[in-house]
């Protein structure tokens, strides 16, 4: 009986999940960059820097920058995410309830694309 090459499988899986993570990060940063440009928020390049992109999201939503510290608290971060995204949806003239749907994986990427690429 021939054994399965688990080392090869785990190597491929690690590589593919790493590429998927990079692709998602680029998509989210691109969407936030475009949303910041469309809402005339200063420094849209912050979308590409980890943690600074949360500050940018707070600026787009009209919330204070120090909310980034509240995003580090479990459970509180989920509520703040909904509040910030609700305000971003309103800034883009979209219904705020879209922010609640953003809790669902994959749907959040689609809604970010809608916020970024529609008028």
Image: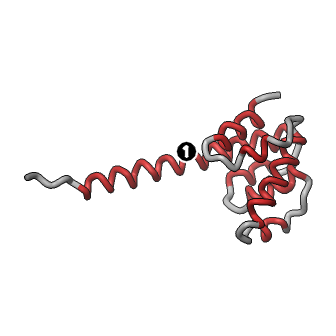
Please provide percent x and percent y for residue 44.
Answer: 79, 48
Up/down of 69 relative to 29, above or below: below
Of 7 and 48, which appears nearest the observer?
Answer: 7
Q: In the image, what residue occupies the spot 73% across and 44% down?
A: 101
Please provide percent x and percent y for residue 113.
Answer: 70, 36
Residue at the extreme left: 1
Up/down of 81 relative to 89, above or below: below
Q: Which residue is mark 1?
A: 23
Of 33 and 12, which appears nearest the observer?
Answer: 12
Crowd around label 1: few <14 · some 14–19 · many ≥20 (10 Å): few
Q: In the image, what residue occupies the spot 89% across and 35% down?
A: 93
The image quarter in which residue 50 lies: bottom right
Up/down of 98 relative to 77, above or below: above
Residue at the extreme top: 119
Q: How is the image coloured?
A: secondary structure
Q: Is residue 105 left or right of residue 76?
A: left
Q: In the image, what residue occupies the spot 90% across and 62% down?
A: 64
Q: SS of the residue at dot 1?
A: helix
Label tally: 1
Q: In the image, what residue occupies the spot 83% across and 28% down?
A: 119
Please provide percent x and percent y for residue 10.
Answer: 32, 56
């Amino acid at each position: 009986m021939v054994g399965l090459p688990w080392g090869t499988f785990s190597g491929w899986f690690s590589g593919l999940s790493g590429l998927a993570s990079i692709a998602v990060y680029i998509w989210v940063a691109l969407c936030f960059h475009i949303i910041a440009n469309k809402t005339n928020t200063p420094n849209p390049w912050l979308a590409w820097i980890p943690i600074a992109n949360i500050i940018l999201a707070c600026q787009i939503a009209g919330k204070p920058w120090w909310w980034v510290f509240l995003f580090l608290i479990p459970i509180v971060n989920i509520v703040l995410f909904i509040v910030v995204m609700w305000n971003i949806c309103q800034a883009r003239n979209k219904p705020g309830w879209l922010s609640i749907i953003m809790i669902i994986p994959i749907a959040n990427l689609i809604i970010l694309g809608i916020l970024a690429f529609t008028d």
